[in-house]
Image (cartoon, helix red, strand yellow):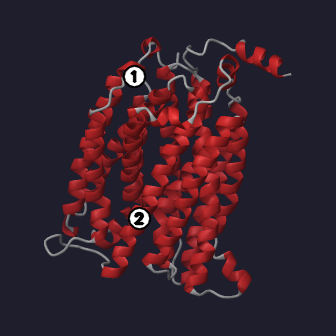
Amino acid sequence: MADETCQDAMHEANPYQPLGRCSILSYGAGHMLNDITSACWFTYLLLFLTDIGLSPRDAAIVMLSGQIADALMTVFAGELIDRFGKFKLWHVGGSVLVAISFSSVFGGCVLCEILGTDSSMMQTIGYSIFAGIFNAGWAATQVSHMSMVNCMTLNSTSRVALASCRNAFTMVANLSLFAVALAVFSLYDVKTSLDIENQYRWIAYISIFMGCCFVGMFLFGTNEPKLKQQIQCKNPLRISWAHWFKKALYYQVACVYMLTRLITNVSQSLLAFYVINDLEMTQSSKALVPAIIYICSFVVSIALQEIKWTSWRLKAFFSAGAVLWMLSGAGIFVLPSTMHNFMYLLSIIVGISNALMMVTVVGMESSLVGEDLNGCAFVYGSLSFLDKFSCGIALYALESYQDSSDITGCHDIRGCHSVIRYGSGLIPAICALLSLAVTCSMKLSEYDSKSLNTPLLA
């Protein structure tokens, strides 16, 4: 039976041929549920928890518990996927956990209702439990989806196209969330803590429904990748972790990926606080400003799909995005509330730089993996581990500092610098500078292939 399966895998079409548009589009839709819930998680979770009465420190504990569960699950899922494959099975299982647990996170404290108490400690524990479940499911879906890229094709340009399409659907997910949030925040009259919970409950339920529709599109439109099975027929030996740890490029890509995710996630998590507390903008701005960022990211991601990628271009476009983030981060850090309209211009720059950095850093991951498909899931899982753990620690540290120093906003930067300003502007700008330095030291040329010159999406 195993020999027969191997024979079927060996008769697959030439893996170096470019993928078609339908294959790329159906793949890109597969992360929509993760993306739309992640956008809500990083943009509104801390704001939601503090609005219903939790302290910034307790809210950060909930966020941290989810990030730790996410980090651990990425390594666990990556190891099992490398051993047994079954990408779509992991994707489905993770999506089910995400849909069920996410509605519980924003749907109220289930544990408090069961035990009949709503103390601060019980709320923190209750929300942390479902945050852990949500992030575990999220990680299983993410690792299976990302590691599919290298197992769908060996064409380097198509791999970047898959990453770019995935990033474009991420923008669609975020825009969908902010459209829903803008409507709910504008139409729903908030008077009590229960009204706040109902606001976010509606946002969560609508987001889950939309995401599940796109997951269905992915499951019906994307076949289980056979390329990994084909490689295993030729070479059944698994690639050990030590193989990656001996590569200098592994550490470079890991560092750049971690810093890039720190830039996007930390700034996004604190953005709503920044526009409301520091810039004193209207309530609708906590949906409008992020929406502008993701509209620009979406447009750039679409444009990036039409580029013939080389290692030099990966580094050049990433460097451009890093420089733009350094400039916009400095602007965010010094912008006074009296000039808050400039935030819309800065949002455009942030959106462009986010797309440039995210698309190209995933391309760097693909370059690192190359044709070593028997260990590709570990690469994506281990890099995601660093991403989740570092983001959780960073946000916990920032929120704890905010709690201890009792800083709620800084309207005029001549008098003070709030922790929100540091987290939204200065820290991401420093991360962008560090990622730029590491990127310039990379040597990706040995991973180029002739297929880079083939027409994209032909």
Secondary structure beneath label 1: loop
Gap between marks 1 and 2 measured at Cα = 34 Å
Q: In the picture, residue 355 is in which quadrant?
A: top left
Q: Residues within 10 Å of mark 2 (few under 14, many from 20)?
A: many
Residue 309 is tagged as: 1
Q: Residues within 10 Å of mark 1 (few under 14, many from 20)?
A: many
Q: Amino acid at mark 2?
A: Leu
Q: In the picture, residue 412 is in which quadrant?
A: bottom left
Left or right position of 224 against 332: right
Residue 243: horizontal and vertical position, in percent? 51, 32
Secondary structure beneath label 2: helix
Left or right position of 46 against 322: right
Instruction: Read off the residue under disc 2.
Output: 395
Residue 375: horizontal and vertical position, in percent? 58, 32
Question: Of marks 1 and 2, which one's residue comes earlier in the chain?
Answer: 1
Left or right position of 16 against 307: right
What residue appears at the point 53 percent right and 70 percent down from the top-left corner?
A: 62
Residue 261 position (above or below residue 313)? below
Residue 76: horizontal and vertical position, in percent? 63, 48
Q: Decide if residue 282 is in sight here.
A: no
Q: Decide if residue 341 is in sight here.
A: yes
Q: How many marks?
A: 2
Quadrant in which the N terminus is drawn: top right
Residue 398 is tagged as: none
What residue appears at the point 62 percent right and 33 percent down from the top-left corner?
A: 26
What residue appears at the point 64 percent right and 67 percent down from the top-left corner?
A: 130
